Image (spheres, coloured by chain):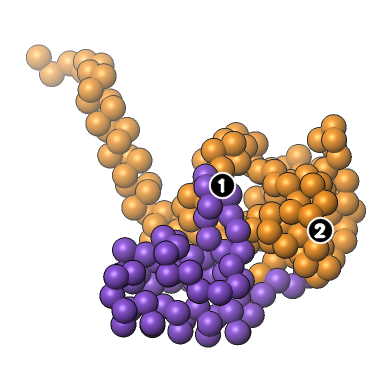
Chain colours: A purple, B orange
Amino acid sequence: MAIQIVMDRTGDRHHPFDPSDLQEVAKAEQRFYELTNAGFTAAVRTGPGQISQIRSFDPTADETLFFPRLIGG
Amino acid sequence: MFGFRPAASHVRSRMRAARMLFIRHGAERTPEGRSLLLLRRWLSPAQQEQLATKGYFEVVGSESGKRYRIYAGTSVNVCEIDERGRVQDGLCFMPIGALPIGDVMLAQKIALETCETNARAVARRFTPSTFQFRQARPLA
């Protein structure tokens, strides 16, 4: 199972999906673009503690994390 | 017959495991607890060690190669550090939406490690005080 994790004020919402199920992948892809179009940043882990930002949906990523737009404090 | 005897080591270790399980279960039920678990999973082993022992962890900026220290906190908690590890400028930035502490620190790490220029562009500068950061406590 792959998972999309979306940060919010309740901690984080988890959206697991099966990468071999086309319907679930399509839903995950839709969620990806809805979130990134709303200003969320998407990131995946590429190694222990190593992270890279992604700008297009990657159905092979085990775990994709989304966090909201950054602002100055 | 009813005297107390020191618990055997296997009993103590079972009690410790049960206590850890209880703490972990409790932590997973709060936004802050869940966010800290997520943060630890996404840190490198060295960063996990720093956070547990020093109350902060360090990251390297994706473009400049500068080192930053992210202290436990949700604002006014990021500082640039020099080659000797001394605190320099402070950067205050965070994701919108009043996120719990672990999520804020993780977003700050990802931002500096993958899009440093953007993070610096939105950040408000502040002058860190030594006192402010001496208060950092380990997040075990």
Asked if both marks, 1 and 2, belong to the same chain, the answer given is no
Q: Chain of mark 2?
A: B
- How many numbered callouts? 2
Q: Nearer the viewer, mark 1 or mark 2?
A: 1
Mark 2, residues whose alpha carbon is within 10 Å: few (<14), some, or many (≥20)?
Answer: many
Numbered disc 2: secondary structure: strand
At 34% from the left and 52% from the top, the residue drawn is B25
Q: Nearer the viewer, residue B136 or A12?
A: A12
Give the image location of residue A50, x and y in percent: 58, 49
Compared to residue A27, the image places residue B35 above or below, namely: above
Residue under label 1, please give it.
A49
> Which residue sits at x=42%, y=64%?
A60
Locate the N terminus of chain B and report the quarter of the image it occupies.
top left
Closest to the observer, B112 or B98: B112
Task: Give percent across and percent down for residue A43.
Answer: 56, 64
Mark 2 residue type: Leu
The residue wearing badge 2 is B91
